[in-house]
């Protein structure tokens, strides 16, 4: 869409009315071509003006990924009869489940996929995938440093006595620390794989660490190094926040299994719940058995109401929603760096996930930032976010998420652990202009 300048807009508006139609001059002076006055604060206006080429690149990414999604929908012959829900065992919904699984598999370059409302978080989907791959005596190796906080108890590194953790089932665990630049330590990875290393876990996004996210090409390079040392070592990618940020996905470069959440990128801000795993067919079946039960696998599970339609529609919208989130992250980085704050990723750097971290330096500023985001949200703007203990997290965490779907990070939100360096992690947004408005409130508050 072509954006008109102030004068061009006024001329176009006048030309749209025939001369015979009187125009109320008294009222037009009060309106005064409102576009002459920006609704954004000067810092945001300046940033937007400087990001034209980056925003255009994001639009090209959105177009390419939309074409990929559209092709998958057409190949699966998606129709309105796939949108109906079901109850009980869910046997009557097979057509919708199969079509959605087929779409996900094709879009992500995988043999098979499992997309279910019964996954209640990304952590749950990743857990089912890990338990599908690992057995007592095996070793899990995290090759991108410490995993996200909520996986620590799943693995058993924070509480080794946690009932039902991988360690409780006799699975050993190691980590390969990140390199000094926040990326993978290639030298360490070259000698990291042992005969008992059954699964290598790669976290694509930054999590709550001050590190950069990994590109799919970097993930592909890591997979080659892992497989050269042990061809039988399976590679699992935590794909949260990374879907549709690039033109390719981890299964396309050799990942054996990936997992993620539908209230992040691939739900397109529409999906009300759910998660997915995708990859080799036999591994997806193993994850399905962990989610349900051996013998039931992918064939059971109801999705009552309108959830299937939301899953399909959200997936179709995902490339566009991710594009808006990327634009928002570019804007956050530009504005906050301009104000002297450390940001990760740096301004105008190519994105590999939808998370933008800002190092705020103190508890008070972190709280103020999140409170400003909450005040600027469409839902719960009158509430004040309070830091506190949250299941699965090691530290106090504050969340600002005035979202239509509870906890949806595909919608505009931010959060951060109350620990040094007091960084806030911003993500999501249905349109970048909301971040433009939010940043004005943030700058006033901090």
Image (cartoon, rainbow, N blue to C red):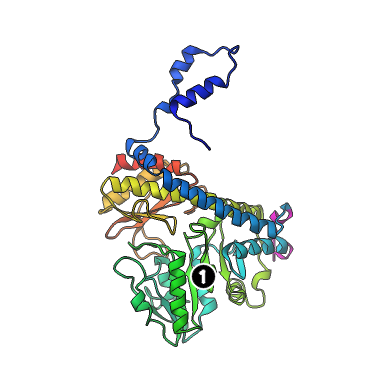
The x and y percentages for residue 300 are 67, 68
Q: Nearer the viewer, residue 326 or 94?
A: 326
Q: Which residue is mark 1?
A: 253
Residue 115 lies, with reference to residue 190, above or below; the image says: above
Q: Quick check: is 85 in the magenta stretch?
A: yes
The x and y percentages for residue 106 are 62, 64
As drawn, is 401 to the left or to the right of 304?
left
**Which residue range is magenta in the image?**
81-92
Residue 231 lies, with reference to residue 421, above or below; the image says: below
As drawn, is 378 to the left or to the right of 95?
left
Q: Nearer the viewer, residue 164 or 133?
A: 133
Can residue 171 be seen here? The reply is no
Residue at the image position 41 percent from the left and 26 percent from the top = 36
The x and y percentages for residue 299 are 68, 70
Residue at the image position 74 percent from the left and 54 percent from the top = 81
Rate crowding at label 1 as few (under 14), some (14 to 19) or many (20 or more) other CA atoms within 10 Å.
some
């Amino acid at each position: 869409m072509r954006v008109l300048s102030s004068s061009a807009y006024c001329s176009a508006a006048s030309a749209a009315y025939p001369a015979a139609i009187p125009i109320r001059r008294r009222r037009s002076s009060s309106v005064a071509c409102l576009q002459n006055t920006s609704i954004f604060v000067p810092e945001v206006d300046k940033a937007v003006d400087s990001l034209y080429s980056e925003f255009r690149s994001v639009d090209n990414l959105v177009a390419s990924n939309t074409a990929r999604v559209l092709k998958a929908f057409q190949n699966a012959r998606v129709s309105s009869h796939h949108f109906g829900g079901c109850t009980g065992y869910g046997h009557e919904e097979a057509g919708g489940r199969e079509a959605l699984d087929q779409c996900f598999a094709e879009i992500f370059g995988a043999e098979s996929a499992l997309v279910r409302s019964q996954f209640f978080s990304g952590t749950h989907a990743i857990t089912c995938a890990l338990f599908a791959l690992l057995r007592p005596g095996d070793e899990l190796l995290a090759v991108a440093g410490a995993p996200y906080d909520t996986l620590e108890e799943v693995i058993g590194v924070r509480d080794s006595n946690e009932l039902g953790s991988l360690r409780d089932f006799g699975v050993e665990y190691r980590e390969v620390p990140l390199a000094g630049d926040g990326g993978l330590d290639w030298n360490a990875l070259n000698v990291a794989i042992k005969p008992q290393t059954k699964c290598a876990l790669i976290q694509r996004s930054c999590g709550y660490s001050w590190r950069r996210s990994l590109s799919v090409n970097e993930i592909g390079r890591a997979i080659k190094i892992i497989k050269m040392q042990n061809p039988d070592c399976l590679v699992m990618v935590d794909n949260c926040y990374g879907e549709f940020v690039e033109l390719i996905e981890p299964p396309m470069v050799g990942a054996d299994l990936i997992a993620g959440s539908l209230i992040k990128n691939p739900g397109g801000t529409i999906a009300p719940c759910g998660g997915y795993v995708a990859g080799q067919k036999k591994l997806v079946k193993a994850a399905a058995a962990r989610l349900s039960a051996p013998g039931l696998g992918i064939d059971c599970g109801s999705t009552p109401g309108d959830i299937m339609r939301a899953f399909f529609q959200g997936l179709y919208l995902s490339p566009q929603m991710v594009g808006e989130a990327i634009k928002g992250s570019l804007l956050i980085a530009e504005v906050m760096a301009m104000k002297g704050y450390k940001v990760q990723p740096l301004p105008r750097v190519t994105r590999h996930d939808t998370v933008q971290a800002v190092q705020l330096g103190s508890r008070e500023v972190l709280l103020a930032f999140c409170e400003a985001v909450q005040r600027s949200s469409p839902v719960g703007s009158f509430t004040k976010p309070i830091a506190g203990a949250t299941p699965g997290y090691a530290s106090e965490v504050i969340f600002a998420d005035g979202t239509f779907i509870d906890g949806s990070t595909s919608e505009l939100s931010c959060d951060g652990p109350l620990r040094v360096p007091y960084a806030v992690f911003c993500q999501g947004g249905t349109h970048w202009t909301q971040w433009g408005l939010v940043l004005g409130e943030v700058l006033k508050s901090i």
